[in-house]
Amino acid sequence: MKGSAKHVILAWATATCVIAVGPAEARPKKSGTQATELDPGGRGAISGIGIESRDIDAMADQVVRELMSRPDFIASAVPPRIVVDSAAFYNDSSQRIDRNMITDALRASLNRAANGRIRFISRETMALIQQERELKRTGVADVGTRGMTAGVAGLDFRLVGRMTSLDNRDGRSGLTQRRTQVLFELVDMETGEIPWTGQPYVILRASGDDVVYR
Amino acid sequence: MPNVTRSCALAALLLTSLLATASVESRENRVLKCKTSVARGAKSTGGPALVANIPRAMTPIDLNAVQMTDKALTRKVVIEGLWAQRTEADTLLITARLVNCTKKPLVVQARSNFMDAAQIPTEPVSAWKTIFLPPRATSVYQERSIGMGQVAAYLVELRTE
Amino acid sequence: MSKFKSSRWMAAALLATIAVPTIGAAQDAAPVVEDKAAAKAAKAAAKAAEKERRAQEAAERKRLAALRRQYGEGPYPDEIDAYLADKPEALKPLYRTLFTGGERNAVLNFQRLGLAAMDRGLWSDAERSFDAALTRIEAVYAKNKQAEAARDTFRKEANKDFKGEPYERAMAYYYRGLLYLRAGDYDNARASFRTAEYQDTISEAEEFKSDFAVMNYLVGWTYHCQNQPSMAEEAFGFATEAQPGLTAPGSDDRLLMVAEYGHSPMKARAGAQSEKMIFEASPQSAETAARFELGDTAAFDAVPASSVYYQATTRGGRAIDAILNGKAEFKATTGAVGDALTTSSLVSMASGNLDSGTLGLAGAGMLLSLFASAAKTEADIRMWDTLPDMITVATAKAADPGKLKAARVDYLTGTETVATKAPIMAAANGSCAILWSRSRAEDAVSADVPGEDSALAAKIARRKDIQQRDKAFRVSLLGH
């Protein structure tokens, strides 16, 4: 019986040993990760299948460069008046996003690049503008230094946009793929014509979750 | 911008002559072969270049050219053509045709720097654009400047995704 | 965060006020004849202050060391109290569970917290919670250690970070979508409902794909409110096709009414090795229908749009099932062979055969049995237990705010009213208004994680890497 007890101990020891080795454990990252400065135009530390930081920059850059090559907008004797805000930017995709982030980036880049060759009009602040005009006209506020106009500035163009997406999933491999497309157009606010449609900004990205989540 | 225009015209002329010969004796049913070593070993054109404040502190970066930022990339990609044209709005449109010399799909990114005659940037560098290169095939990269007449030189930078 | 910042600023300001007069005094004193005694006294005072500071530091270190001994990397009681201090009273137990539960249960804790916050009309708490849950659901878990552990034969599935079954993920998107509808943000509401519907397509079994009618219906509603009739029609078409009885709203309807009732699907373990995750039959709920009353005359019967229980039970096989089956098979086979070997060798030994071969066989048998018992086959049954079963909808023409406020929901059994409630959500922030009600909004919500394997949770929580991760998680919670 002594021998068998030894065997049992041996077997137990071997088994524990094997079990202990079995699940390979990656070394824990004890130190955590310090906040790091990243390039907003780069891939970033976390990437998914949707629109990311770099896309917003790339998108804005593309629209600006295309529009700046259009003589009918930037080389006309009287700078055209354009509104760029999220009121006419539609998110039809399956990604939740703050649309203002896209239109703000676009307006900022465009306004800086245009350097006075395009006039930007705000419609978001209409209520505030009207309030101020009222104060000036009732004499509560003086006329300011720029004088008064009969009305607020009328629009020539509005930049409209739409973000759409197409999702696909492969049940077997667990891969999820999303095509996201962002399209910008200039609409003539008098005639309704579309004098410019930008090159669609398209991304196609795929990723897969671990099998335990499928 | 006489430099750019001249090189552009020259390239166009070269291209037409090439096209002319091609129509006579076109090579078909062949797979692309590259000698990237030839491109790597080529001498500078002697045109404008970015030079370090302390000369010889870095290799000069040729302007009006494509600069690769990755050694591996220099063995995989060849620049077949590089053109600069003035748009109607007097901005500069750069077009580069890249060739994938490998038998695998390649994903590269490119961006453009535009500068004036004194090599001062006329605008922020463009955003990285992703270019998908099928195996042994070509793809085109295009970028427009924001600046107009003052843009006198450009530099395209290429990196692996 | 703001608290930390302000206290830090105050400390800085205090230092500044102390520092300035000291410098001033030193300058004033410079021309005066040196007073040795005074200088000595000052030096002694400085020394004492320094000593005091060191003693304080040492005490703090000691306190932290004691806490670390008791709680590991935390959370320490005072940390928890500080975190909970500004939280709504009703949600404190759930916030505590979230804070102490770490990253592994974060999605589930955020989901339960978010819904509890909605039940109480605490919209910003709900929005933040669901955003945090969705961020984690959307994170891609590739090459993730916890996920790998879940697959390991010798470790339980519950090792993995909770992301929920597709129906649970879909419901998180659904509630976030309702919150967007409340705010009048139709674009993001649509994105949420779309993704919710999409979660349902995870199933490998083709025939179950995309039948979550209410999500398509709500996608249609967002288009409807944005005056895009053709897109709306398409989405309503998908919904009405999947759910008989459901009809598209009238073209000038501007009020959406959503009522939820019934019990959440309850997960349980089944199979010889507890390797199967199944759903228990939901307890019979008193409510079987809902009716909205706007004023005295107008009543609208809410139409069943989707059953969460149906969604949970019809998804077809999960990929993890095959792994768990494999584990169970391993356990059963290895165990059986091990037992057989041991038994036969012992029988042989009992009959006087004590050669080394028999002993070896007995040893091998025991080894296999040990392997078998080490295999961890249990399915993970952590679950979102506060969900409803049935989601019903109705629409009507725009109602004035007074009527919205006075609206009532009757929950019925057949035609008999069991309960009458005021809708929790009554909002008109965009071109459309929304009323939302839940029959079980007032039900007590347990602060414990339902279906949690507490022994495993405690074991995981002791691991150094997990402690670091949870510490980072708590820091991120303190950030907002």
Image (tube, coloured by chain):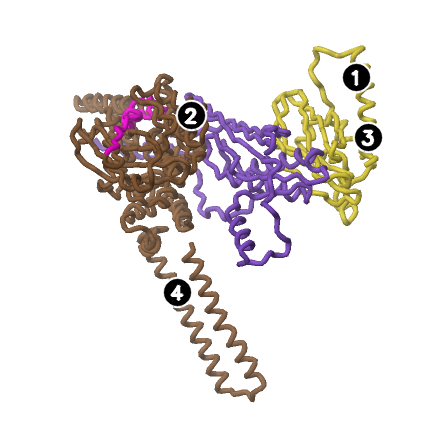
The colour with which the image depicts chain B is yellow
Percent coordinates x, y for residue C71 in the rendering: 32, 52
User: Which mark is in front, 2 or 1?
Assistant: 2
Image quadrant assignment for residue B98: top right
Q: Is residue C362 magenta?
A: no
Give percent across and percent down for residue A149. Answer: 61, 48
Furthest toward the bottom, the residue is C33
Callout 4 secondary element:
helix
Q: Please tell me whether mark 1 sits on a helix, a strand or a loop.
A: helix
Picture colour for chain C: brown
State which mark lies toward you, 2 or 3: 2
**Considering depth in this image, is C183 or A62 the residue closer to the camera?**
C183
Amino acid type, mark 1: Leu
Query: Can I make out residue A20 in this image?
Result: no
B81 and A203: which is toward the camera: A203
Q: Are marks 1 and 3 on the same chain?
A: yes
Pointer 4 indicates a residue of which chain?
C
Residue type (three-letter) at the residue carrying disc 3: Ser
Quick check: B60 left or right of A210? Answer: right
Q: Which residue is mark 2?
A: C232
Q: Is residue C212 above or below residue B146?
A: above
Q: CA distance from mark 3 to mark 4?
A: 74 Å
Instruction: Estimate how packed mark 4 is, as few (under 14), some (14 to 19) or many (20 or more) residues with alpha carbons within 10 Å.
Output: few
Where disc 2 sits, the SS reads helix
- Which residue position holds label 3? B7
